[in-house]
Image (spheres, helix red, strand yellow):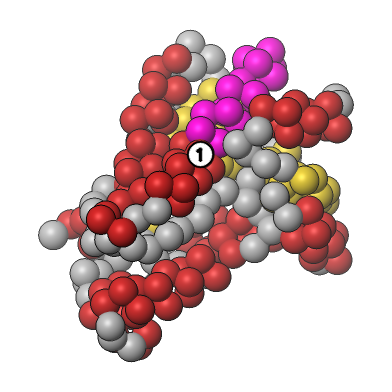
Amino acid sequence: MNPLARTILVTGAGSGLGRGLGAWLAQRGHTILATDLQFAAAQETAAQIVAAGGRGGAFALDVTSEESIAGLLSALGETRVDVLINNAGLQYVAGIEEYPVEKWDLLMSVMMKGTFLMSRAVLPGMRARNFGRIIHIGSIHSLIGSPYKSAYTAAKHALLGFSKVLALETGGAEITSNTICPGYIRTPLVDAQIAGQARTRGISEDEVIDTVMLAPMPKKAFIAIEEVAAAVDYLMSPLARNVTGQALAIDGGWTAQ
């Protein structure tokens, strides 16, 4: 049994990176509260965790809705949230001149407003227990820009500023706020980006992978979910209590250039 086992709330846990993080962390003895806009997807994640011998529960959650968040906290009752992983996100690929305003608003609402609302919601409990870890899943696009991803890049950059302010406001407590910024991970979200980039650029999906996604990375490889999960595990630990307000890049050397 892990003596440092925590209860971890993961947003966007119904697929991709969120599901992978939940599964990996559950295998290390942590309890996973899997939340997703699609309740059935969150249930599937929790079921996989339990089937593998871990502890997990599923909850429907719209991170953009104060009412939905309040309902989640009510459903959790006395269950503490030691760690919040702000992972919920989505992508839309288009040039700025063709970018639909409703898509811009949706991406900003989920990834920026949702992060703010979720962080604000769990902070009182963390302060009462004098412990908390808030980990934002950023992106290589928190650090650099890419054509046709204006809303996503803007939202992911904004995470860094928000995380720094949160770190300063919680500096007097055993609470930290950090952002993990991975390069491309082969998830359904990235698969959709590959298809979208292929359409927008008029090239094949293989060309998108080789000449757009992996070309800037000296390592020339997708990031593994386990790499991100291990970073989360470290940031949760007592040894990371003085790591706060930071951006941790896992990018195959992309930003070293």
In the image, the segment drawn in magenta is 113-130
- The location of residue 204, given as percent across then percent down, is 33, 88
Using the rendered view, name the quadrant where residue 16 is placed. bottom right
Q: Main secondary structure of the magenta part?
A: helix
User: Could you tell whether 138 is left or right of 83 in the image?
Assistant: left
Observer-nearest of 238 and 8 = 8
The answer to whether one can see residue 234 in this image is no
Residue under the image location 23 percent in, 80 percent down: 211
Question: Is disc 1 placed on a helix, strand or loop?
Answer: helix
The answer to whether one can see residue 195 in this image is yes
Amino acid marked by disc 1: Ser
- The location of residue 221, given as percent across then percent down, is 35, 76
User: Could you tell whether 51 is left or right of 151 in the image?
Assistant: right
Using the rendered view, name the quadrant where residue 44 is placed. bottom right
Residue under the image location 45 percent in, 51 percent down: 103
User: Could you tell whether 181 is left or right of 137 in the image?
Assistant: left
Q: Is residue 11 magenta?
A: no
Which residue position holds label 1?
Answer: 109
Residue under the image location 27 percent in, 54 percent down: 96
